Every structure is written in C-alpha cells, then in structure tokens.
Amino acid sequence: MLPPFFDDIEQRTFAFFWETANPANGLVPDRWPSSWAASIAAVGFALTAYPIGVERGYITRTQAHERVLATLRFFANAPQGSQEGGVAGCMGFFYHFLDMRTGMRWAQREISTIDTALLLMGILFCQSWFDRPTGPESEIRQLADTIYARVNWNWAQVRAPLICTGWTPEDGYLSDDWVGYNEAMIVYLLALGSPTHPVEARAWNAWTGGYDRFWGRFEQYEYLGFAPLFGHQYSHLWVDFREIADEYMRARGLDYFENSRRATFAQQAYAIANPQGWKGYNKYCWGLSACDGPADFTGSYQGSERAFNAYGARGVGVIDSFDDGTIAPTAALGSIAFAPEIVIPTAQQMLLRYGGQIYGKYGFRDSFNPSFQYSATLNNGRIVNGLGWVATDYLGIDQGPILGMIANHRNGLVWNTMRTNAHLAQGLRRAGFRGGWLAVG
C-alpha cells in the first residue's frame, strides 16, 4: 500500500506530460518552464503516462487515444532523410531533440539510438495497452508496428555487432558504441526483437562482454554497477526483469531486478556514510542521477576545493563516481519498485523537510543542492535561504521514471502490459533470457 501523499505525487507528475505536450503532434518539452525543444525520450515517457492517467482516473480512455494517435501519426509521417535539416530522423531513427512546433531537427543535434529506443518503448506500451477492436485503437497498434518496423538497426552497427550511440549528417557516426552495463539494454532488446531489421544474437554477447569492469562491491553490496541510478531504472520501467535472467546473470545467481535493488540500497548507504560531508545527506535524503546542477563552478567547501556541475550525470559506485552534493528526487522515487521500504520514507521526509521549495505544480523539481550557497552564474535554478540551490525546471526524462515506477509498484501496470508485447518477448528470448514469465507466456 502507498500512503495517500503519493496520490498527489502521481497526479502532479502525470500533469507534466499531459499539460506541457503540444496536442497537435504529441511532442513533449525536454524541460519546463524553460522549454526550448522537444525530447523524443520524454515523448516515450509521455506515451507511457497516458494509459496510467486513464487507470488512475485523470483522463478518459478517449482522451488518451486521441493524444496517442496525434503522437503516432506525427512520428509515422514525419519526413526522414540524410539531409541536415527539414527532417525528423533518418533510417527510422529520430533526432534527440525536435522543434516543439514543426517537429523537425533542432539545433544540429544527433540521431540518438537510446532516445529513439525510449520513444519506441512508449510506443510499444501503447500498442499493447490499447487492445480494443475499435478503429482508433486498431490504428494505434498499426502505427506502432509501422514506426518500429522502419528502424534499421543494422545501419547503426558501424562497428558490428555493437550498436553505435548516434549519427549526424555533418560528421557521420559518433565514435562510441553501446557496450557494458548502462541504460541501453533496451536498445539491444529492441534491435533483437525487430521484425524487419534484427541484429544477430551475438550483439547481446558483445554488449555483456563489457560487463566485468562494472561488477564489484560498493557499500557492502555486490552488484553490476552503473553510477547514476537512471541506468538502473530506464529499461526496468518497461521490462519486468524479476526472475528472468540472461547467461551473464544466471552465472552470477541473480536477476537484473535484484541488481537494481542492490544499487538502490548502496546509494542510500553512501548518503548515510557521506564521505564528502555534503549538507543534508542522510538515510532520508539521497539519490544521485543525471540531473540539473547549480553551475560549472569550483569553490571552497569545508576547507577544500570542490567542483560543481551544471547539467550532468551524478552517481557513485565501483567506477565513474561523481558527487557534488546535488540530490535528484527521481533517483530515489524512480527506484520505488526496487526498494519501497526505503523510498517511501525518503519521499515523505523530503516533503516534510523541504516542502514547497522542491515540490510544486508538477511534483518534485528536478534537483536541489543544500551545500551550494555561492555567488555564481546559476544554471536553471535559484538560491533559497537556508536550503541552498534548487532547480526551477522539471525534466521529462526524470519525471518519467517517477510516474512509471510508482505505477509498477502499485499494481505492475507497465510491466504486466509489456509482458504481452511479442516484440519485447522476442528480443528477450534472442538475448538468452529464460525463466519466470517468459517461460509461461
């Protein structure tokens, strides 16, 4: 059971997606109120939010399918091509950021394989949830297949069998591939499940081949690490990893769900230990992830020089740790399905301690830093007396895990729906996942 104050968190977080989207094309701002472009990943989270809103009674099923149809019609019909402008994507993939009004490429940003994957997971969720034989819901399912089938995953394998992180018409393929443990599990699962351009099964082995340097013990927990918590949340929002495992995890004797649970507890343990002495850290105030930060600034703190960042990935673990005292509520709340016993009291105490300073129209603001009280050129935030720096924006990619994971903890809505999606099941099986619900469905 969730305490009553979570009803308010859910409704406000849902309202971010419903109210800030462009209803004509379904595009959702990367951030609000300083919106400057649409994020295709935020659209994926929005598409997941709409059925949650129906289930919770915030909107009607008709309202939801109208918004979803507007979104899918846009992505199905948006121009694609290799030119530098006037298109929304290329080879079935989409640009990371799009113009909120026109839907075309924004500011020479890259084709992003992970952001396209986040968009596709929202699309496939709608494909499975809208299961009635009506004209609008049938069209949703057909459009979802059209958009997914068009993605040419083989084109993104410039260094096969790995999948590249992205591409631009100006410079070609980006230099990095997705390898090792992070948020990109869904990239490979979608590529393996593709009905038209599937990658070879060895792509999953190449992906997991980078795992070993991420495995280790941190704060007394042994797990496959990724420093920011969003890497333990994004794929899990749509995929129920409980009691299913690939070859790597079977050899370790656990599943990815238990792995994310350990990562969550390890972050809380780190905040309790607080080795850097940041203000506010304790068992009820913790959570490091990619989020807004106060500024790119170096200042003296407790007798030593400390580096602070504006937007960036924060996290701790076996490797790649960075902590500048900035807490992201999405890090904790997006982990509620993994560790409700520590997340629920954390949310409650954050509200009691900081109240309206970090909680507003659309729920929790993106982040806050009680230790930052310097005179500096600030990044999307303000200094609050006695609290430090507080973000003024809400970010779609941080709102999404909060809403989706609350729904999964409440009744498994997203997980249970995605269990029925044949594309996802195909991808999991080709990656070598066995057991649990895959064995019976």
Image (cartoon, rainbow, N blue to C red):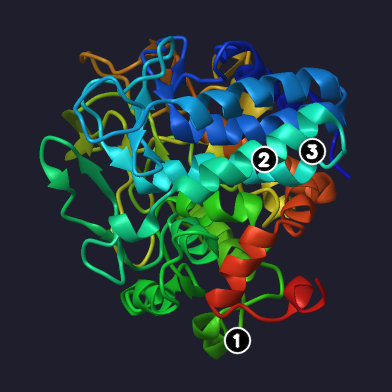
Q: Which residue is mark 2?
A: 142
Q: Residue at x 77, y 36 (%)?
A: 138
Residue 89 pos. (x, y %): 35, 34
Q: As drawn, is 374 to the left or to the right of 292?
A: left
Taking the image as drawn, is residue 238 in sight? Answer: yes
Circle 1 crowding by C-alpha within 10 Å: few under 14, some 14–19, many from 20: few
Position of the N terminus by quadrant: top right
Q: For this rendering, which residue is in front, 440 or 348?
A: 440
Q: Which residue is mark 3?
A: 130
Circle 2 crowding by C-alpha within 10 Å: few under 14, some 14–19, many from 20: few
Q: As drawn, is 28 to the left or to the right of 160?
A: right
CA gap between label 2 and label 3 equals: 11 Å
* Circles 1, 3 touching at the beta carbon (< 8 Å): no
The amino acid type found where label 1 is placed reads Gly
Q: Earlier in the sequence, mark 2 or mark 3?
A: 3
Q: For this rendering, which residue is in front, 401 or 167?
A: 167
CA gap between label 1 and label 3 equals: 36 Å
Q: Earlier in the sequence, mark 1 or mark 3?
A: 3
Q: Secondary structure at mark 2?
A: helix
Residue 333 pos. (x, y %): 63, 41
Q: Which mark is residue 389?
A: none
Q: Residue at x 62, y 37 (%)?
A: 143
Q: Quadrant of residue 68?
A: top right
Point out the frontmost of discs 2 and 3. 2
Q: Which residue is mark 1?
A: 253
The amino acid type found where label 2 is placed reads Gln
The amino acid type found where label 3 is placed reads Phe
Residue 343 pos. (x, y %): 67, 46
Point out the frontmost of discs 1 and 2. 2
* Circles 2, 3 touching at the beta carbon (< 8 Å): no
Q: Quadrant of residue 34?
A: top left
Q: How many marks?
A: 3
